[in-house]
C-alpha cells in the first residue's frame, strides 16, 4: 500500500526514542523520574466533573453544531470581552483540543508558496502542521538574552511580501517566557504595516501566568490588527482537562466559518459532554485556578534554583506555563555529541527522562515539566546533578 507523499514531510519526533525507552524501563520495574509530561498533575475540578455528569443525566449526548454549542461559544466570547476584547460568539469555534484548532487554521489559511515565520524555541507541532498544509516555515532563533522572545526590530527585518504568516506563543511552551503588553503592542505595530501577514497567537497557558491574573493578549494590546489574528486557547492546561480534548479559536467570522466547514468533514463537533463541562469551567471561581497557579509558581522556584546549582547549567526563570528550559550546552560537545545523546545518558545513568531542546528547535537545551510533586522535582534534579558532576571529575 502506497503512502501519500505528504506524510513523508512530517518527521518522527526526536523525543519518541527517549519516551519509548523510559516507558520500557519503567515496565521493567526501574525507578524513572519523568519531567516530560505536558499536563497538570491535578485532578479536574469537581464542579467541572459535576457539570459533565449533569449533561449525561440531561441527555446531552447527541450531535451538536459543528463549531460548538451556543452557550459555550457565548461563554468564551464573554470571557474574552472581560479581558478587554470585543468578541462575538460567531467569531468563536471549538475543536477537539488546541492542536486540532491549529490544524484547522493551517489547512484553511496556508498553502503552497506561503512562508510562515516561527520563532524558536517553538512547540513541536507548528512546523509539522505548516508542512502538511503545503506551506514552508522559516525558523527564527530567539536567544535567552532576549528571554527567547522575538523583538520588533528583528520582525521588521524579516517581514517582506513573501511572508504570509507568523506564529507567536505566550506563555511559551517550551520556555515559559511571556510577552508583555508593551512588547505585544510593539510587535503589533510592525504587523499592522504588513496586512498580508496572518498571526497565530497561541495563548494556551495564559491563565498560568505568574506576574498577574492573565498573560497579555495580542489583540487587546494592539486592536488595529484584530482582522489579521487568530487566537488559540483551550481548557487542558488551565482547568486540568487534558483528556477532555477541547480547544478553541477566536478570529474573523470568515475564517471561523471556513474552519467550521473543514471540521464538518473531519471530526464534526467536539464531544457534547465536554462542551457542557467547559461552560462550567468558565464559571469557576478564580480561586480554584489561583490555587493551582500558586503551587506551580512554588515548583518553578524550586526547580530553577536546583538546576542553577548544577555546574555549567543556566536556567532563565519562566514567567508562565509549567516548563523550565535550562541550557545544558556546557556538556556539548565536550562530553556528548548532541542533546539526544545527553538525554540518553541521563536516562541510563540518572534514571531521569527529559525532553531534548532539539525537538523545539533549540539544540543544547532541555525541557523539564514541573507539573509533578516537590519530592520528585528535588530527587530528579539531584540525580541529574550527581550524574553530570561525575563527568567533571
Image (spheres, grey):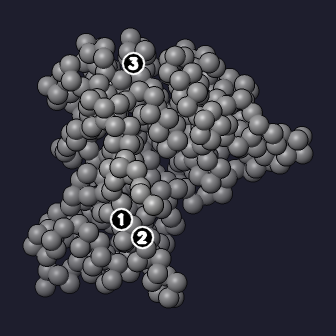
Which class describes the residues within 10 Å of circle 1: few (<14), some (14-19), or many (20+)?
some
- Residue 362 at x, y percent in the picture: 23, 53
Which residue in the structure is indicated by mark 1?
15
Quadrant of the image occupied by residue 184? top left
Marks 1 and 3, how far apart in space?
34 Å
> Residue drawn at (9%, 73%), measured in percent from left and top?
334
289 w.r.t. 179: above or below: below
Question: In this rendering, does residue 263 appear at all?
Answer: yes
SS type, badge 2: helix
- Residue 277 at x, y percent in the picture: 73, 42
Marks 2 and 3, how far apart in space?
38 Å
Which class describes the residues within 10 Å of circle 3: few (<14), some (14-19), or many (20+)?
many
- Residue 217 at x, y percent in the picture: 44, 27
**Viewer-proximal residue among 326 and 297:** 326
Image disc number at residue 19: 2
33 w.r.t. 306: above or below: below
Which residue in the structure is indicated by mark 3?
228
> Residue drawn at (67%, 52%), measured in percent from left and top?
44
SS type, badge 1: loop
Q: Are marks 2 and 1 in contact (CB under 8 Å)?
A: yes
Relative to 343, 323 lies left or right: right
Q: Quadrant of the C terminus?
A: bottom left
Amino acid at each position: 500500500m502506497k503512502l501519500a507523499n505528504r506524510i513523508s514531510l512530517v518527521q518522527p519526533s526526536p523525543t519518541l526514542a527517549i519516551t519509548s525507552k523510559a516507558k520500557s524501563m519503567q515496565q521493567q520495574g526501574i525507578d524513572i523520574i519523568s519531567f516530560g509530561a505536558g499536563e497538570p498533575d491535578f485532578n479536574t475540578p469537581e464542579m467541572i466533573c459535576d457539570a459533565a455528569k449533569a449533561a449525561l443525566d440531561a441527555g446531552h449526548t447527541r450531535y451538536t453544531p459543528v463549531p460548538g454549542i451556543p452557550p459555550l461559544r457565548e461563554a468564551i466570547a464573554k470571557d474574552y470581552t472581560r479581558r478587554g476584547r470585543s468578541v462575538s460568539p460567531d467569531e468563536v469555534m471549538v475543536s477537539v483540543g488546541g492542536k486540532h484548532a491549529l490544524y484547522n487554521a493551517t489547512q484553511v489559511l496556508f498553502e503552497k508558496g506561503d512562508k510562515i515565520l516561527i520563532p524558536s524555541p517553538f512547540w513541536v507541532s507548528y512546523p509539522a502542521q505548516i508542512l502538511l498544509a503545503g506551506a514552508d516555515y522559516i525558523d527564527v532563533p530567539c536567544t535567552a538574552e532576549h528571554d527567547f522572545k522575538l523583538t520588533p526590530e528583528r520582525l521588521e527585518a524579516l517581514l517582506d511580501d513573501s511572508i504570509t504568516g507568523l506564529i507567536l506563543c505566550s506563555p511559551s511552551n517550551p520556555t515559559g517566557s511571556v510577552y508583555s503588553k508593551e512588547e505585544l503592542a510593539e510587535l503589533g505595530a510592525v504587523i499592522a504595516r504588513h496586512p498580508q501577514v496572518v498571526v497565530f497567537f497561541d495563548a494556551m497557558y495564559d491563565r498560568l501566568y505568574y506576574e498577574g491574573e492573565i498573560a497579555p493578549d495580542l489583540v487587546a494590546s494592539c486592536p488595529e490588527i484584530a482582522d489579521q489574528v487568530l487566537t488559540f486557547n483551550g481548557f487542558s492546561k488551565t482547568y486540568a482537562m487534558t483528556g477532555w480534548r477541547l480547544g478553541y479559536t477566536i478570529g474573523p467570522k470568515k475564517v471561523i466559518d471556513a474552519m467550521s466547514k473543514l471540521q464538518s468533514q473531519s471530526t464534526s463537533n467536539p464531544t457534547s459532554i465536554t462542551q457542557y463541562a467547559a461552560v462550567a469551567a468558565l464559571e469557576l471561581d478564580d480561586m480554584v485556578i489561583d490555587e493551582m497557579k500558586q503551587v506551580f509558581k512554588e515548583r518553578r522556584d524550586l526547580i530553577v534554583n536546583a538546576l542553577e546549582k548544577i555546574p555549567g547549567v543556566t536556567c532563565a526563570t519562566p514567567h508562565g506555563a509549567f516548563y523550565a528550559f535550562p541550557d545544558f550546552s556546557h556538556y556539548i560537545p565536550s562530553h556528548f555529541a548532541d542533546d539526544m545523546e545527553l538525554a540518553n545518558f541521563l536516562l541510563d545513568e540518572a534514571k531521569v527522562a527529559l525532553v531534548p531542546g532539539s525537538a523545539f528547535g533549540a539544540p543544547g537545551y532541555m525541557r523539564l515539566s514541573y507539573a509533578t510533586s516537590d519530592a520528585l522535582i528535588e530527587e530528579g534534579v539531584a540525580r541529574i546533578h550527581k550524574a553530570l558532576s561525575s563527568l567533571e571529575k
